[in-house]
Amino acid sequence: MSIISTNGLVKIYDEKTFPIYATNDISLSFEKGEFSAIVGPSGCGKTTLLNLIGGLETPTSGEIVIDNIVITKLKSSELIDFRLYNIGFVFQAYNLIPVLSAKENVEFIMHLQNYSKSERNNRVEELLLSVGLKDKMNKRPSELSGGEQQRVAVARALASKPKFILADEPTANLDSKSTSDLLDIMQSLNEKENMTFIFSTHDSRVMERARRLVSLDDGKIVNDEKIG
């Protein structure tokens, strides 16, 4: 059963002056437990598609359904709450809060969800252990390597116990070793906990791990291939 589906998804920028179709009539679905990548050249629309699915951007037309909820019909305040409790995000630039420690960055979303202090402590410790950073939980982002910061970002994305994780070019700023370590962690979470991951990427290292590749060009799906 699909947990995410899009129907006729269109996103146009500069609609009144020089229309640019970032996505053009995209209809597709993802099932729970997928480890999939949206791929294609720069400017093909993959990040826009990910942002639309995550409710970070509003489509010009079309529909997005997540877990039987039509998020394109939600009010702005409802969409914020929906993202908070259902979607985990991992960004290319990490987006950690610089004045907070790794522990505080991971538990920040749990504050918003009104978890108790003991619940936060237990979950954060468990998550940082799972990404190999339990010994660095009190370090601030500036004291961590790029790969370590991205692992904190993965732990933060998992903190809210989301239905799925959207990862936008998560390996773009990482060296080969950090990329391999990060993908090992994500793949393990996918296989052991059936956590759904959807990447946007042009990194061949991510594509090699994905079990489905959705290829875009000029805002349209040109290939949708399941692997293995």
Image: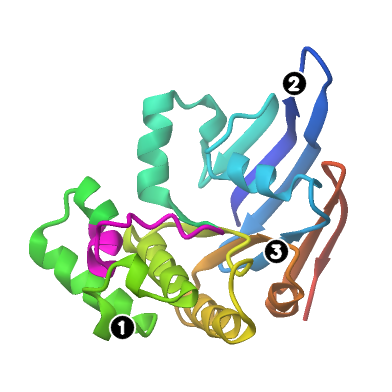
Q: Nearer the viewer, residue 43 or 61?
A: 43
Task: Specify few, some or many for label 2: CA neighbours under 10 Å numbering under 14, 14-19, or 20 or more.
Answer: few
Q: Earlier in the sequence, mark 3 or mark 1?
A: 3
- Asked which secondary structure carries label 3, the reply is strand
Q: Position of residue 124 (x, y in %)?
A: 24, 70
The residue indicated by pointer 1 is 129
What amino acid does circle 3 point to?
Ala
- Asked which secondary structure carries label 2, the reply is loop
- Work out which residue is located at the far top of the displayed protein and give it: 16
Residue 156 painted magenta: no
What amino acid does circle 2 point to?
Asp
Residue 14, disc:
2
Q: State the separation of the CA atoms marked 2 and 3.
A: 27 Å
The residue indicated by pointer 3 is 37
Looking at the image, residue 147 lies above or below residue 63: below
- Asked which secondary structure carries label 1, the reply is helix
Q: Is residue 46 left or right of residue 123?
A: right
Q: Residue at x 70, y 64 (%)?
A: 37
Looking at the image, residue 145 lies above or below residue 5: below
Q: Residue at x 17, y 49 (%)?
A: 114
Q: State the separation of the CA atoms marked 3 and 1.
A: 26 Å
Task: Describe the colour scheme in one phrase.
Answer: rainbow
Q: State the separation of the CA atoms marked 2 and 1.
A: 45 Å
Q: Quadrant of residue 24?
A: top right
Q: Nearer the viewer, residue 133 or 194?
A: 133
Q: Is residue 91 left or right of residue 97?
A: right
- Work out which residue is located at the far front of the displayed protein and give it: 142
Q: Which residues are magenta?
A: 92-107
Q: Earlier in the sequence, mark 2 or mark 1?
A: 2
Q: Residue at x 75, y 31 (%)?
A: 10
